[in-house]
Image (cartoon, grey):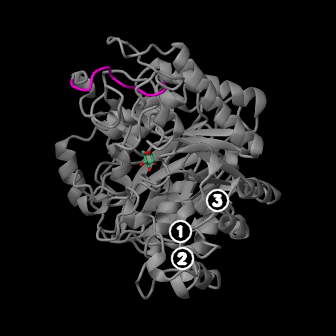
Amino acid sequence: MKIKSIMKALLFKTGWLLCLIALTVQCKTPTKEEPSPVITGKYTIPPKFPEWVHQAVFYQIYPQTFYDTDGDGIGDLKGIIQKLDYIKSLGVNAVWINPFFESPFCDAGYDVSDYYKVAQRYGNNDDAKQLFEEAHKRGIRIIFDYVISYTSVEHSWFKESAKQDTNKYTNWYIWNDNTWMNPPEAYKDAFVKGYSERNGQFMRNFYWCQPALNFGFAKPDEPWMLPIDHPDVVALKEELKNVLRFWMDMGADGFRADMAGALVKSANMKGNDQFFSSRSDGTKLFWKEIRDILKKDYPEAFMVAEWSNPQDALDGLFHADFFHWFDGYNDLFQKEGWRILNGYSEGHSYFDREGKGNITHFLESYMEQYNAVKEKGYISVPLGNHDNARLGNQRSDDDLEIIYAFGMTMPGVPFIYYGNEIGMRQMGADWPQVEGAYKPRNGGRTPMQWTAGNNLGFSSAPSDKLYLPVDTAKDAPNVSDQESNPNSLLNRTRKLIALRHIEPALSAYAEFIPLYAKENTYPFVYARAKDKEVIVIILNPSASETKADFNFTYEYKDLELIAGKELAIEKAGGRMNITVPGQCYAVYKLRL
Ligand code: GLC
């Protein structure tokens, strides 16, 4: 309660007048009512979690552009197997692989046409089995993408469902009962008409080629809307559980649930929210059943949601939730219209040299969620992914290192998007837009850069046959060059990942306390603590030197720098005073 009120005060108290002062004077004179953040070292480990998750660092692999072993220009599972030693060398202990199932690739494999089969271009099911085994030999866990809110139009279930005659699959998708009648207003953009001989329009869950599987409606108020316990809905859900068991029994260690909040339909969601936000308790009920299967039969398995609403996703359901489909995430990394490239955002990223960003908007949403879920599960603020522009978008290696220092020291489970460890760059909007990868996704899914050689070591195929062209810049970063340079981003990232495993205070559950986070101000300072282990993290992504002066009553003998650069720090009278050069960060461990 106390911490909550301190945070509230930190975030909201500054009025417009103080804002003005803060803009001109970087270090605001402390006022009487300034709160004293209290580091207690207390924490709760979320119950019934696999032990390995508390220290987990994930690496995300986009299979089509990671490593191509058969020379067809598209990455494959054998390629991932070949690169497992590299992955291990990063220090990560888990990998999420984007969908590798059979698909016509209208949405890069997120349109599954056979849940039980690896797409030919990636290899076959034996390769998947081997991948799980080889990863396990190296102490690496692999989670797959469980994409079950829709299938491809090419899935045999959908082809059956689209037939005029009633059959087992008729109700497995959502169809209204009259092609000429518009669906209710709330769903008006979500239906596709005239697709097959079946009279009715089907509901999509994303692109037109991704018909929504029928998890039922929270409030079925049309005859064609089924309740969530309708026998056909139940039959579908049972089949999807079989899909889960199939991959788990083959050796997977869990899954990432695609669009996890968008299963059961309800009319209260609009626009993109209908795809990503909580719709009803029925959705939660389904994930609860899945969690129970894991608890009982796969107790070491991990499930993470693409939901971006931790309070819903972690309500006894998932172990972790990706928190990136919200404004606060953009505030961190992609606030500029040219960075997010969808034309819907204006402003300045906090992690940018120009130093015009604001950490408090992110922190406000984050703390609200964090305080609500910290005893239940983990929030994951991903370090890039396949749906966003790369973090390496007009950012130097130094800029990126500060971002990774943030990622590796925040609570929860970090995920690093492949290639970010070497600073791969976002390609321009004119890059080919293959398989539903419209900007900025096209520019962030380019082939992994292994060497300076042909196709940057990704594939032996002719360059025009690659899934996406590689970065053409003369100084495009690559693994091989960075391996031999101790100060490369690759090696600096490895050090930060290693910290996460070594330091108890950086465990996913260790206490998180913002110490200095002010509107439109740098640096951002916070502590992580577990019992008597305390770490203080100071981040100044801006190019200018900046100062912070804040209450800090915790007693210690010495500060040990464990990452970043040594700073000028004074501690007197229960306050800490820090001077941070531009583009600089420091991670200090308190010696008691
Ligand atoms: C998820 C995936 C994204 C995909 C979408 C619809 O958000 O991350 O890549 O396009 O689902 O399938």
Q: Residue at x 51, y 23 (%)?
A: 167
Q: Mark 2 belongs to which amino acid?
A: Gln
Which mark, residue 558?
3
| Whole-percent x, y for residue 376 in the image | 60, 29
Q: Which mark is residue 473?
A: none
Q: Where's residue 279, x and y in %? A: 40, 24
Q: Is residue 375 left or right of residue 352?
A: right
Secondary structure under tag 1 reads loop
Contact flag, marks 1 and 2 (Cβ < 8 Å) = yes
Q: Quadrant of residue 49?
A: top right
Which residue occupies the foreground of this view, 303 or 247? Answer: 247
Query: In the rendered image, is residue 34 in sight?
Result: no
Left or right placement of residue 137 versus residue 384 in this view: right
Q: Which residues are magenta?
A: 172-180
What secondary structure prevails in the magenta region?
loop
How many numbered callouts? 3
